[in-house]
């Protein structure tokens, strides 16, 4: 049951995870949270959607919020290096039995894209072209809230982390760290990267397909504790679900928040460079209390159990498959 | 049951809480914790005792660790402004029915002192004179561990916070903040100061007399999260009992640690100035989830229940009196 | 020429320096600087004046800006512990040959006060009573700019630091640190305190009487570097005159800014406790490159030469007396 | 004279700059500086050389210090993605007229490498294989000094930045930022990257070939100000040449130090992601006072003038070519 850690180099180049689109039920409430509290920058707004980015970002958006009847993950979007990589990616998914659609003009500021549901049930988008927006990295006079610099990664629930890992490995993703059950080395969570950081996507064992969280980076840990102070100053401390603290896996400083629809957002800073060709995965035992929070803190059950349903091919939430393991059961805390 | 918040000016001047002496069972293990991990500076060491101070401190010691058969609080020491204040303090405690002894030469570096057990059962010491030690505040090249600058306060369990408050009010202590039961305004915890900070001593409702914790300050919050990283790097993360986080009461950033004998140590930074003559106490409702940790975090039961017994007049631990209330029972979290 | 470092206890109690009033030529420009950039909180505004405070402060104001024909220091205000201390202070200044006036209702929110020009030529105010304003310490959601917590100290140019020191010593001020010429121990700068910090007022040798700067504290050094980032983000980096850096004297982290009228403002954090009865002054040699900036940085000439004229008894700027020494001439950098 | 900002994709893949070797005259003094003060980790030590790395690094070394008769840059080393890339790189340099030598066993822990002097006169090394060392990223208990995480970049003096840029562009390097003379758009300094950060190498106009500096990253800005405090605590503040401060170019927080031989070391943190395929260079005017230090600080002449000679093909320092421009002459500060 151990992971095959050899690397695969497919004939296309996925640069990184680039954005997600979340369905929200009250766009004004979401705007108040993401813009007024977190401080994300609106690039564009329409009647039913909000396109947001961080202060460092130059692409049109790294988060789309769109009004809908229930909270959903509409899709996860990856950027490819060259326009022709879209064809390579489409071929790869078709070979896996997936239907692949070409879309254009659906998202503001974005060029041609492909969309599909992957074998795990996740709605995905791949694109190359997107409009540039003004980089505000040094406009410290407009920084607000969590002082978010850029999007970093997604984390998703999959029923079987080993199976999810194999799918992503075939697409050229590499493993930076994983948590395993010491009895049989079963992977319980896996961190996978394309850009030279700890991850673009992490797989968490749980009822899936669901989004576990979407993560943004800040430049300093003080921006993360500072956002907690801001939330408490507003008496909205219940938004804080877990942390702040330092992760064992990834070494990053973090906090997890829940938005008005329950979508989970992570603020994250301080992981490390993974771009060397012989970069080796780190293995954590599920029984090391430091793996999730380096300081040994208990992880609340909600963090292991709750998540955002994903849009099914026909609309509405995709049905869930029960997980094959529970990280908490093999943990001594 | 509300607190009488008028101030009393007795005919003596207690400057601040200045040190505690803790009985420890394994002096080498305690040295490893306080000197090697926390980074306190040893001013003097004898066969059975260790005299420690922070980098900013100029007095000989702010913590004495002395070997003994079981973990105890040997005494809490307050400094008085003038030598003659010792007589004034002695008179005040005698008027309360306490026996007061004069001691000299018991602690290295310290001049004449008085010792007594107060009406709450706590072993106290008052002194004026102490040798000066080298101030290492700007010797950043020798800073280690938690980068502790100075001692700040003690926190003790008393069965009845209102009664404890009245005792300290009579000695000239003033209230900066308190937590009260909304039903009848019963105080559940009280913060009291002489120096112009939030407290020299805090009273926590619980089985007493016991020491709840002794607290040191650091210059920056990063020293507190950094000490957590150091502990986890050593795989000693279990030393961390609560936090790090920001307090509601006091506004300080904090973490609570447990030493090898279970004595609780707080690292604390970022409270505020209380020295103005019309400084008014802040009241917190026991049902405000932010009062203990501003970010709304749950406080572990051990933090409300465990503590260090105090030395009884005849030696050994003083018997405990059951508390009159339980802050947790009037709290909605 | 050495300082007499023994302490004097006069029959009145000055608590601390509490505010200054600055005359400004363009109130809207000053508001933009102090409120919009620095983030001070306006307690009250009139046609010709702005009353400001920091987030921690509970008194009505710690800075008054009032429109006038030229930039001046209108007065420095000290708070006394008891109402009757105003009489004691008045007597002391009259004994020095000063005229003392009683004023009331001149400043919003303030009770009866006395005003005078001291023997050094500085316009001073003493008061006891002031209205309370809302403490915003934990309203992190409204923090802006430099995240200023409270006023800390004034620094003034005097022609002869030794003479200035003697005046303040007689009022009960104590010396925390001083810079001296190694050849004859002449003091070139002196730091004096009433509250238990490094200073309420510092004396800088230079043409006087003039205000050198007024200082506010922040809770963290990051607020000071962050304000520099904000200024540069606005392309107003020329506002930064010196620093950021760490002081040798006081150990505080600092930056010096120049407001639209050229008044110098310091942001300051991280000095130390001075409240013990045997607290001893630190002496710095003028030839130690670390005394002004601990990291050895060169201090610009403007910082040694420029300052704010003070209001003369008859209005307009007070004439200047040439200094008796120049710290820069005895310095090897 | 403007830069050609189109990208070139050569048939080999340089991953990043990976280490430099510096010749030092007193290895014990260098060890005291790099290990005891800066806190770099020694992986291996021989009679005449010291192999160092940062806490995050997994390769055997990112800095070699080797004893020699005079301070020199022995070589700059780049890592290539695949073993066969060494041949591709060798071919490219031979086509430029350079002699390329194959070496093995010269550096501890390193596999086969090629060495050459490039057309600008710089001694370079390219390698693929290197032993792994223990990653100490989460061993916070052993962190010391500047808490250096990893090597980041080199900066070199070249007489003509445009010519240097063209050479590196041909090797697949991309430009992230540059400083230009507004009169004719002449580039005065250029930042070039292979890994997805602001640079692996920067070109500074000056008498060359010389090394301007070698830079290491820290995780937090506080590690950089903290190292300044440590140096001042040791009264070695003269080691600090420029900063700390924030860069305009790169946005990073920085300080420049001079080692016992005068080699310049930068501590650097907080630049940004450059890995997207359409990442566009930022242009700074040489007359913007913020370009070098965002806060507008003056840059000392030593920083523009002094540097480390490079080893000539026959040993000893390479002769210098005078620069074609001087950034300071086109600057208004």
Image (cartoon, coloured by chain):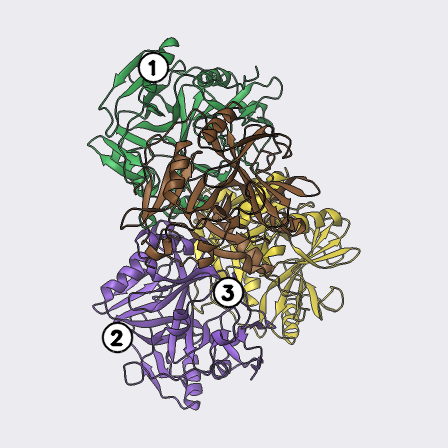
Chain colours: A brown, B purple, C yellow, D green
Q: Chain of mark 3?
A: C
> Nearer the viewer's eye, disc 2 or disc 1?
1
Q: CA distance from mark 2 to mark 1?
A: 72 Å
Q: Which of these two is toward me, A284 or D207?
A: A284
Position of residue B121 in the picture relative to residue C145 (left or right): left
> Nearer the viewer's eye, disc 3 or disc 2?
2
> In the structure shown, which secondary structural element does the residue marked by tag 2 occupy?
loop
Position of residue B123 in the picture relative to residue D199 (left or right): left
Q: Quadrant of residue C43?
A: bottom right
Question: Which residue has dot 3 on it?
Answer: C196
> In the structure shown, which secondary structural element does the residue marked by tag 1 occupy?
helix
Q: Residues within 10 Å of mark 3 (few under 14, many from 20)?
A: many
Q: Residues within 10 Å of mark 2 (few under 14, many from 20)?
A: some
Asked if badges 3 and 2 are on one and the same chain, I answer: no
- Any part of residue B207 in sight: yes
Which residue is at 37% across, 56% downward?
A328
Q: Which of these two is toward me, A118 or D122?
A: A118
Question: Which residue has dot 2 on it?
Answer: B70
Residue at the far right: name it.
Answer: C47
Quarter of the picture holding the C terminus of chain D: top right
Asked if badges 3 and 1 are on one and the same chain, I answer: no
Q: Chain of mark 1?
A: D
Question: Which residue has dot 1 on it?
Answer: D90
In this rendering, the answer to whether D189 lies above or below A242 is above
Q: Which of these two is toward me, D8 or C23?
A: D8
Residue D146 percent across, percent down from the top left: 38, 43
Quarter of the picture holding the N terminus of chain D: top right
């Amino acid at each position: 049951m151990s992971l095959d850690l050899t690397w695969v180099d497919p004939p296309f180049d996925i640069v990184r995870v680039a954005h997600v689109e979340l369905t929200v039920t009250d766009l004004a409430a979401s705007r108040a949270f993401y813009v007024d509290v977190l401080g994300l920058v609106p690039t564009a707004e329409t009647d039913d959607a909000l396109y947001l980015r961080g202060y460092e970002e130059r692409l049109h958006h790294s988060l789309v919020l769109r009004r809908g009847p229930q909270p959903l993950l509409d899709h996860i979007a990856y950027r490819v290096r060259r326009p022709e990589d879209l064809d390579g990616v489409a071929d790869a998914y078709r070979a896996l039995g997936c239907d692949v659609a070409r879309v254009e003009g659906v998202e503001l500021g974005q060029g041609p894209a492909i969309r599909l549901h992957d074998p795990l049930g996740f709605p995905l988008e791949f694109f190359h072209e997107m409009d540039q927006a003004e980089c505000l990295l040094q406009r410290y006079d407009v920084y607000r809230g969590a002082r978010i610099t850029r999007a970093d990664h997604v984390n998703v629930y999959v029923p079987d982390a080993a199976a999810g890992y194999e799918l992503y490995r075939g697409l050229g993703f590499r493993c930076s760290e994983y948590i395993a059950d010491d009895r049989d080395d079963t992977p319980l969570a896996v961190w996978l990267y394309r850009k030279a950081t700890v991850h673009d996507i992490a797989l968490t064992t749980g009822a899936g397909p669901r989004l576990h969280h979407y993560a943004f980076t800040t430049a300093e840990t003080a921006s993360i504790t500072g956002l907690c102070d801001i939330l408490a100053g507003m008496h909205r401390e219940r938004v804080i679900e877990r942390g702040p603290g330092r992760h064992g896996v990834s070494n990053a400083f973090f906090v997890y928040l829940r938005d008005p629809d329950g979508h989970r957002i992570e603020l994250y800073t301080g992981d490390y460079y993974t771009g060397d060709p012989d970069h080796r995965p780190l293995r954590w035992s599920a029984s090391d209390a430091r793996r999730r929070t380096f300081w040994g803190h208990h992880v609340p059950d909600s963090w292991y159990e709750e998540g955002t349903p994903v849009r099914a091919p026909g609309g509405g939430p995709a049905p869930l498959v029960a997980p094959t393991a529970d990280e908490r059961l093999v943990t001594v805390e």
